[in-house]
């Protein structure tokens, strides 16, 4: 059974850091693209970052460029989102998702994703 497990959220002060993890269960992320999405209260879910296993290419939302870094372990079992210089507006529930390589047009768009993990709450205090 394909499962994604997101973890690493928490409460942090503005300017602090957190590292989110998205672990694959029952498969590996090899041959998948993996994305991180977030949803703040009262807002639509938005793409934060994504990474392709086929060529290690990455993409970021403008709001997080230069502060967040997406990466994977060598075996593509876990994908990470390192979040630095956190801001109160980064507060949201963060979700990871996976889609088979080639089955999407833009890895920052959620509608193509097939598999989703449960969310992990990130709260940044001012």
Image: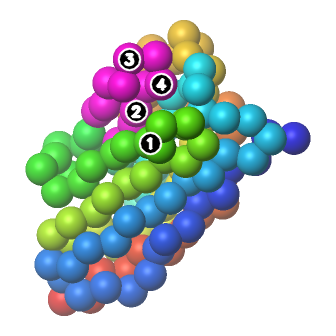
Judged by depth in the image, the label closer to the viewer, 1 or 2, is: 1
Circle 1 SS class: strand
Q: Nearer the viewer, mark 4 or mark 2?
A: 4
The percent position of residue 20, horizontal first and vertical second, equals 44, 62
Q: Is residue 24 among what the camera can see?
A: yes
- Residue 58 sits inside the magenta stretch: yes
In the picture of the structure, the residue carrying the numbered disc 1 is: 72
Of label 4 and label 1, which has the lower sequence position? 4
Chain-order first, disc 1 or disc 2: 2
Q: What residue would you read off at disc 3?
A: 55
Residue at position x 60%, y 43% from top? 77
Image quadrant occupied by the N terminus: top right
Determine which residue is flagged by label 2: 51
Element class at badge 3: loop
Mark 3–mark 1 Cα distance, whole angstroms, equals 12 Å
Q: Is residue 63 left or right of residue 29?
A: left
> Real-space Cα distance between discs 3 and 2?
9 Å
Q: Position of residue 49 (x, y in %)?
A: 35, 42
Mark sitting on residue 53: 4
Chain part drawn in magenta: 49-59
Which dot, 3 or 2, sits closer to the camera?
3
| For residue 119, side relative to residue 67 (left or right) | right
Residue at 47% across, 74% down: 9
């Amino acid at each position: 059974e394909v499962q994604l497990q997101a973890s690493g959220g928490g409460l942090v002060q503005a300017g602090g850091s957190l590292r989110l993890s998205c672990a694959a269960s029952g498969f590996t992320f090899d041959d998948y693209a993996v994305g991180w999405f977030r949803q703040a209260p009262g807002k639509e879910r938005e793409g934060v970052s994504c990474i392709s296993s086929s060529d290690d290419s990455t993409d970021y939302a403008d709001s997080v460029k230069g502060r967040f870094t997406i990466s994977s372990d060598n075996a593509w079992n876990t994908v990470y989102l390192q979040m630095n210089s956190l801001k109160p507006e980064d507060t949201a529930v963060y979700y990871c998702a996976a889609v088979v390589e080639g089955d999407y047009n833009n890895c920052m768009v959620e509608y193509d994703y097939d598999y989703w993990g449960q969310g992990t709450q990130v709260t940044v205090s001012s």
